[in-house]
Amino acid sequence: MRLLLLSLTLLLALTQPAQADGLPDLGEAAQGDFSPALEKKIGEAALRDIRLHEPAYLDDPEVNGYLNRIGHNLANQIEIKNQDFEFFALRDSTLNAFAMPGGYIGVHTGLITAAQSESELASVLAHEISHVTQRHLARMVAQQNQGQWVALAALVAAIVAARSNPDAAAGAALAGQASVIQNQLNYSRDFEREADRMGLQLMEKSGYDIRSMAVFFERLQKFGRLYENNAPSYLRTHPMTTERIADMASRIQLRPYRQVPDSLAFTLVRAKLQAADGVAEDMVTDLETQLRERKFKSEAAARYGLARAWLRVKNQKGAETQLAELRRLKVSSPMIETLAAELRTRINDHTGAIRILGDAYARFPEDRAIAYAYVEALLAGQQADEAAKFATDDVAGHTTDFHMRALQAKAYAMQGKPFHQHWAQGEAYALQGQLMPAIEQLQLAQKSPEGDFYEHSQVDARLRALKAQQMEEMKEERQQR
């Protein structure tokens, strides 16, 4: 409902007279109204709504972890590092990606599986990163004579609503103004060229094949011409022209050729997403044919995808067979280990899953999916003390990880420690920007007789800080209206 209201607010804003076309000047006054801190808050709020209410949000630490590794590799090449980025996936077969204020970038799974190389996927992420660093959304809204908070928040809401169907942003009751909204959702040609140019620079500095940007975008354009009424959503919000592709090609022609092999992670992530789509039985048949006829780009990815497809049809033996083949191929990846642990868990061999994940964590200590799976396996195996200790040690080094905080709360609950459970859960909510639930959890912790004087003092201080933050945010929202 809130997204709908924001979209309608945007419609009203966009029917007002706008300033001249072109790139608006963001001088000191505009920067003051449109601070990066304001963009960050709106982006955080939008991502929070997506996580809580968007059914397509893909809560998969392996897929999102991979996107963030690729995205941060690109973002680390930015000369002036004053912007954080977070990348997330949405389970949607359409070819799309979108950037929100504050550095939050969503990617449809359809775009990941459509990319024929890791460099092609990197080219889209680099393009979206450049939209953020150049503050294109802010510059679009700066053309409107409206309150900055309302206009930018509404534009973000419309982008989210329109990610698969751009016309949906207008709303059925006001469909006559849909074209006005669409014109604002579409990036201008100047913005697109700027994002192309800067995206190519990020790709080159990051070691990717820069030719992949022109190749992928040209393929999207051809797809759009073939299916005019069902063109990729990405083309509808990022207008593609022959001039843009020619401009990219001319820039690329001057650079030396570099062949870049795909990472194992790219092939496994694509295989995981492909195995989860469509009819599982059809995917099993297709992958078995590929393996039998040796028609695959990566045998490891084909076998991993087949194992995942077998799991969808509840064929444990088939999945175990493919895992054995992956072991024979000596494939080393944290995704293989989580698959092996999942197979153990499905037959209630929690001890086996714990052993696999414990060994995997020693080999891949920075992989968050392994860390989460290890705690979940300990909890499933009724090893609450071990789970609580691991989670507590882990959050000390990953202070903003709300997922691990939530697992820590589960471990405390299993231990029968309500004070620490509510405290940890409150911190998990706070890290997600859910201030009211966070305050409620800390209030429950306050009432618990458990915990020593020092711990209660910490909870009291944290509660006061969250209440002050809540009041400040309410005050800022009223001012921005």
Image (cartoon, grey):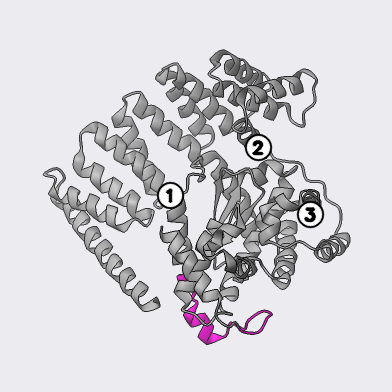
Residue 36 magenta-drawn?
Answer: yes
Residue at 76% in and 41% down:
261
Residue underneath mark 2: 270
Residue underneath mark 3: 221
- State the mark number for residue 53: 1
Residue at 88% in and 63% down:
254
- State the mark number for residue 186: none
Query: Which three-letter amino acid code belongs to the residue tagged 2?
Result: Arg
Which secondary structure, mark 3? helix
Mark 2 is surrounded, within 10 Å at the Cα level, by few (under 14), some (14 to 19) or many (20 or more) other residues, namely many
Name, please, the residue furthest toward the left: 449
Mark 3 is surrounded, within 10 Å at the Cα level, by few (under 14), some (14 to 19) or many (20 or more) other residues, namely many
Could you tell me residue 149's position as x and y percent?
45, 73
Q: CA distance from mark 3 to mark 1?
A: 32 Å
Residue at 66% in and 40% down:
266
Q: Is residue 348 left or right of residue 412?
A: right
